[in-house]
Image: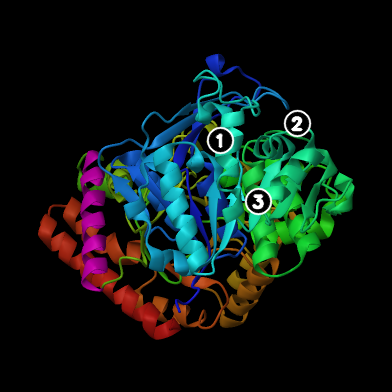
Amino acid sequence: MVDKTLDLICLGRAGVDFYAQQVGSRLEDVASFAKYIGGSSTNIACCSSRMGLKTALITRVGDEHMGQFIREQLQREGVDTRNVITDPERLTALVVLGIKDSDTFPLIFYRENCADMAISVDDINPTFIASGKALLITGTHLSTEHILNTSKKALRVARDASVKTVLDIDYRPVLWGLTSKGDGETRFVANDSVTDHLQSVLPEFDLVVGTEEEIHIAGGSTDTLQALKNIRDICDAVLVLKRGPYGASVYDGAIPDSLDDGVTVKGVTVEVLNVLGAGDAFISGFLRGWLNDEGYEQALRYANACGALVVSRHGCTPAMPTAPELDYYLKHTDEISRPDQDVELAYLHRVTTWPRQWEQLYVHAFDHRSQLETMANEAGVSSDRVIDLKQLLYTATLNVLKQRNLAGSGGILCDDRFGQEVLNAATGSELWIGRPVELPSSCPLEFEGTASIGTRLKSWPTEQVVKCLVFYSASDEPVLRQAQEDRIVELYQSCCESGHPFLLEIIPPASESLSRGESVYRSIQRFFELQVRPDWWKIPCVEAEWAKKIGVLINETTPYCSGIVVLGLDAPSAELAKGFEAFRGVPKVKGFAVGRTIFGTPAKEWLNGKLTDAALIAQVEENYDEIIDLWQSAVQ
């Protein structure tokens, strides 16, 4: 008996979606596209994982960048990729999609001899399939003789192992060769051959899910009730009918004389932006309830709500809800008429879909610009030397992380003015990467560069954390405080739009009358009042009493916050060690982000020609190593 370590195994399409970013445009007029993973089976595997199910995907991808993108993104979504096979002969499938209006969604499938249609019987691992509670196959993977044989083998293996079998009909006429190649939008073309094809395998399924049009093609009739009865004549499966604005119904056993006499749950009324992917979200929500034995009505509630959330969003896989946001939506459905405009839903979606959480974080912060320019000027050298310096600091950082086996816990803060080459090298690695946006020393806060902050962020890799330092106190005089708050709100909203994590660093002004800890605490309270909820906080060393209060405030107000890092402010090591101790046991504290204490003295000597490159690296390594030891001794 094989242990059921997986809830759901999906077999089928895996591709890359290029989604038009200009809503309302013809595809001919679209200027830019967003890149997401896609394909019905991939969408379902990811959404089901977000629902809390342990999922896996059986598919093939090309031996190229798009195939690797799919594999890596599946892993970020928590999907088991052991049976995502790299095909050396074929390219990954691509889809180009647009959103013209609420009824028009042009799309073009680029799937000629694509990798996922080459899944073979040799790819079907009986032990792997037996480890799942359910196997799901989508209709496209019944559409050719080769892929049908592969799917049939998977079904035989599943049934022999008492694995539940699920069919999402997912009828795309273009993928059955029934429309012109460019017509991916058409959802229904009656065809006896396709009906016969589907009916030859329907008896192998325990659950069949489809829209009315999909039930029509499977049942061989455009009368929905008759089509259901035709399916029931050859198949004992539980049938789930998606009925659009009427909700959905389940038919277990004999088909009644009225569609409404099945187990029916009315749908959620929302304004439609994009129907693509809604069906995949629907079945994922249904499977959450079905596989957890929560009953048909609850499964349908999950399913309808999942579909409603996705039709109000851009994209397929990235639009899929997580269990926390779905549960929140179900609890507040009557109050949320526009899910796409609900602040809390948007926040929950943002913070519960982060691909990675950091348990500990040792950040070498060398995003300094004005301080290093001053050092260079005092040394009588060109500021271009700062570019070389940052590459050496990066090398030293990597050396320590490698020596201490901390690759998954290391990070850097680096700017793009002097450190663009470092940022380029670090991006795509295991490092946490923060990148500043503030104009150094500005108060009131200004952003560096001439472009708007939203425009700047569009060119940044999405894994980079947007870091902003603000000299701020909630007790600042009103005009100054308002100016600073407006900039932070603008930046936070830009990060929400661009998808970048946001780190807010608060430094109380020297004139502050409150203790540093109380000042930071009140500032954080104020930003929460403004609905600014950073993903990361960077705070100075404060009194132990206030460190705990700050941790509790952040944890209780934003439980999905990624964490707090403690900064150094050029303090000596001994002073830092004492400051670190205040954060022992404080919720959300993940580590430190220290800069000049690590690199300050050796950088000055190097710029003055008193240290070689190797000597600089050695001293920075020693200092970074010491700070890590101090943190671990003080906090862990």
Whether residue 543 is visible here, answered yes or no, is: yes
Q: Residue at position x 68%, y 23% from top?
A: 104
Q: Disc 2 designates what residue?
A: 222
Would you say residue 403 sits in the magenta stretch?
yes
Tell me how far mark 3 sits from mark 2, CA to CA. 18 Å
Badge 1, how many Cα within 10 Å: few under 14, some, many 20+?
A: some
Q: Which residue is mark 3?
A: 208
Q: Which residue appears at 78% of the width and 56% of the height? A: 301
Numbered disc 2: secondary structure? loop
Q: Mark 1 belongs to which amino acid? A: Gly
The percent coordinates of residue 304 (x first, y second) are 76, 50
Horizontally, is 458 left or right of 478 in the view?
Answer: left
What mark, if any, has residue 454 been given in the picture? 1
Q: Residue at position x 45%, y 64% from top?
A: 129
Foreground: 48 or 456? 48
Which region shows up in magenta? 384-404
